[in-house]
Image: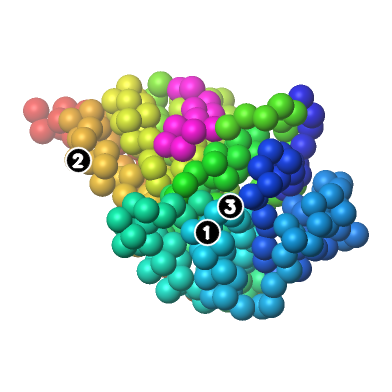
Amino acid sequence: MSVMTYIGAIGAAQREAMDADARVIIIGEDVEANVYGTTGGSKSRAGSGDFVQMYGRSRIRNTPIAEEAIVGAAIGAAMTGLRPIVDLSYSSFLYMAMDQLVNQAAKNRYMFGGQNSIPVVFRSAMFYGLNTGAHHSDRPYPMFMNVPGLKVVVPASASDAKGLLRSAVDSDDPVLIFEACPLWGLKEEVDDAEYRIPFGKARVRREGSDVTVVAISGAVPLALRAAEQMAAKGVSVEVIDPRTLVPLDSEAILASVRRTGRLVIADPAHRTCGAAAEISAIVAEEAYSALRAPIKRVTALDMQVPFSPALEPAIYPTTEKIVAAIEAVTRTEKRAKDTRRVDA
């Protein structure tokens, strides 16, 4: 075991994948000297080593600033035998390649009758909360949940980032990995040996019996802090990290809600048509009789991200907002009992 940052674990997973399979390549803008440390280079902050010296420029491919071309080239490379990892930097840059992602990466296996697989991984970083403005701060994973053929991965820890990326490289379908930059510097012990984390397998980050909190991506540490605060008040909170949204481990969520009877969902993406809305619908359809209180969603507001450092933090979930939601669902049953007593 070694102590790694989240971003360091991403670099370690890429090194392992490239050592294990000569078909794995990395392509993207400025990947030769990636300042975030996932491919090393002179500017690396992760100490991951210089990937160009290790693997050569035939496997570490710098590209022009042209996301549609980058994604299209990666899809073609994947269909002809390579296994590309594409570094698309900001998640908002995915929009420039929507036609390639939605009409080619997601559909080509179907359009070719299963004769081709599309083993390509698209990494993108969500730089929200860092005052990067509306064009650079989106958390767009919910819209890609609506595209059949794409797998959507949202790691929330260093160990999960490493294991999920290795599974993504092994996948014969296109995988979108969304990395929350507020998590990049978080450290934990990570297994030095190779390992994979299967898609569609949620992780119970904290066991509890009174309330289920499903926390997505950057909301996970907020939910864990909220659970600690509620424990001091005598409320036992179970925190579930889905880790992947497509496929989604709905059974783990349903099993937890059937035990606790209450559900709060914390999601840094927008509220309307978001991951939290989908999880709410699944629980309402499949476990309604188990609910002892209305479902609560703690999400980002449906608005563009302000550039102002004073305004931007107000639109996202916080520990305090999650605590308030937990308190609301645990008060509901008491209010219902008091109402029945008054009616009688």
Q: Amino acid at mark 1?
A: Thr
Separation of disc 1 and disc 2 at Cα? Answer: 42 Å
263 part of magenta stretch = no
Separation of disc 3 and disc 2 at Cα? Answer: 39 Å
Residue 139 position, x and y percent, is 51, 61
Q: Earlier in the sequence, mark 1 or mark 2?
A: 1
Q: Which residue is mark 2?
A: 285
Q: Residue at x 29, y 25 (%)?
A: 258
Residue 55 position, x and y percent, is 80, 52
Q: Residue furthest right?
A: 42
Q: Amino acid at mark 2?
A: Glu
Separation of disc 1 and disc 3 at Cα? Answer: 9 Å
Q: Amino acid at mark 3?
A: Arg
Q: Which residue is mark 1?
A: 80
Residue 265 position, x and y percent, is 41, 44
User: Are the residues tagged 3 and 2 within 8 Å (C-beta)?
Assistant: no
Q: Is residue 54 left or right of 144 when viewed as pictured? A: right
Q: Which residues are magenta?
A: 197-208
Q: Residue furthest left?
A: 344
